[in-house]
Amino acid sequence: MSEANLRKALEDLLNMYVANVNSGDWGYWNPEEDPEVIAARKALAEPQEIPEYVDQPLPGCGKCHACLKDHMTGAFPTVLTRMLVCTYCGSKRCPKAADHTNLCTDISMRGHWQ
Ligand SMILES: [Zn+2]
Ligand SMILES: [Zn+2]
């Protein structure tokens, strides 16, 4: 991905956060206090020299914060270039999105057999 595409992706991510919060779908919280939003805004505010790079294979499950936290996509942490959500319930706020070894809250709230 080029730097321009990465910046576009970050902007899209920010817009999506704000849009989702405003719609109330994700409950009520302030997106400006979300560490991902803060980091993304910082990255967008500071023009960066992007070195040539080769995409590294995604570590671990490749879908949770714990596995991707040290992975970089170019000059950006990979966790900022993609939306990491629970692979089961699709929620960004699910503990399973933070670490795939956590239990999905959706599963625990529904009980095991429903
Ligand atoms: Zn994982
Ligand atoms: Zn979940």
Image: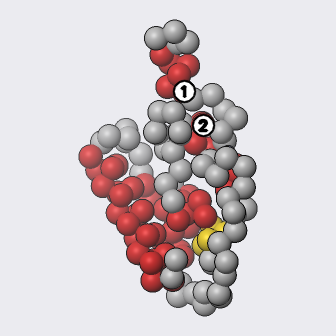
Mark 1 vs mark 2, CA separation in Å: 8 Å
- Identify the residue at image location x=53%, y=39%: 87
Q: In the shown orientation, is residue 94 left or right of residue 67?
A: left
- Identify the residue at image location x=41%, y=75%: 8
Q: Along the line of sight, which residue is nearer the eye, 45 or 1?
A: 1
Other-residue count near label 2 (Cα within 10 Å), few / some / many at <14 / 14–19 / ≥20? many
User: Could you tell me the amino acid type at mark 2?
Assistant: Lys
SS at mark 2 in the image: helix
- Identify the residue at image location x=66%, y=41%: 99
Q: Please state the horizontal and vertical placement of residue 72, each as a whole percent of the image.
A: 67, 69
Contact, CB < 8 Å: mark 1 with mark 2? Answer: yes
Other-residue count near label 1 (Cα within 10 Å), few / some / many at <14 / 14–19 / ≥20? some
Q: Is residue 75 above or below residue 83?
A: below
SS at mark 1 in the image: helix
Cβ of mark 2 under 8 Å from ligand 2: the answer is yes
**Res. 106 visible in picture:** yes
Farthest residue in the top direction? 113
Q: Which mark is residue 95?
A: none
Q: Which residue is mark 2?
A: 96
Q: Please state the horizontal and vertical placement of residue 5, each as a whole percent of the image.
A: 45, 78
Cβ of mark 1 under 8 Å from ligand 2: the answer is yes
- Identify the residue at image location x=60%, y=36%: 95
